[in-house]
Image (spheres, grey):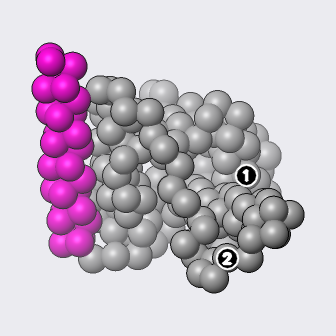
Amino acid sequence: MRNPRPAPPPGEPDDLELMARVAEGSEDAFAALVERHERLLRLFFRRLGADAGQAEDGTQDTFLKVWLHRDRYRPLKSFRAFLYTVARNVWYDRLRKARRSRETVRLEEMRGAGVEPVNHEATAGVERIDARADLAAGLETLPERMRIVLVLNAYQGLSYPEIADVLGIPVGTVKTRVFYALRRLREFLESHVRSDAR
């Protein structure tokens, strides 16, 4: 389940060394970081629910922000924690934009039909998830705060302290969310195994 940490080839600089060079403007060091992390970053977005195109866009946006804000990087935390903090912000920005876009379309459709909603939040319905007994569908059923900690830990291989840095929450909260996410995921999979057996 867990992806191996991208290790530098023997004799190659580690991520922190590369990022220090990137901060000085080295395009070669930046290309090496992209090559080392882009596949796992695409998988990160896919596991959060993005389709292939959205995952590619999210990955590109993340690396673009890393390059544009390279002078702000301070090696106070691991490079992976820094990278996934940027990726998390990209993901949340995309969710907010998508939510606003869906709400605008719904409101326009309702107004076109002569219906004016009283509670705008209530009109932002939840998309129906195809209830297949697989891990991807199970992940999609998790609340966002649970899904992101589980993906960062189980798939991206970040430690609890790294996830705490990425999300800006205490390590204990990370552990609790991982525990409940795993429990809900197990319940989801068990319920679909039972329903398939009928």
Looking at the image, residue 78 sits to the left or right of residue 146; the answer is right
**Residue shown at the point (60%, 68%) measured from the top left:** 123
Q: Is residue 184 magenta?
A: yes
Q: CA distance from mark 2 to mark 1?
A: 35 Å
Closer to the camera in the image, 188 or 121: 121
Q: Give the quadrant of the N terminus.
A: top left
Residue at the spot of label 1: 61
**Residue shown at the point (22%, 40%) measured from the top left:** 188
Vertically, is 75 above or below 25?
below
Residue at the spot of label 2: 117
Point out the residue furthest to the top here. Answer: 197
**In the rendered structure, which segment of residues is drawn in magenta?**
171-198
**Residue 166 image position (x, y, % from top left):** 44, 65
Closer to the camera in the image, 148 or 86: 148
Count numbered badges in the picture: 2
Q: Answer few, some or many: residues within 10 Å of disc 2's Cα (few below 14, many 20 plus, some between 14 and 19).
A: few
Element under disc 2: loop
**Residue shown at the point (32%, 58%) measured from the top left:** 146
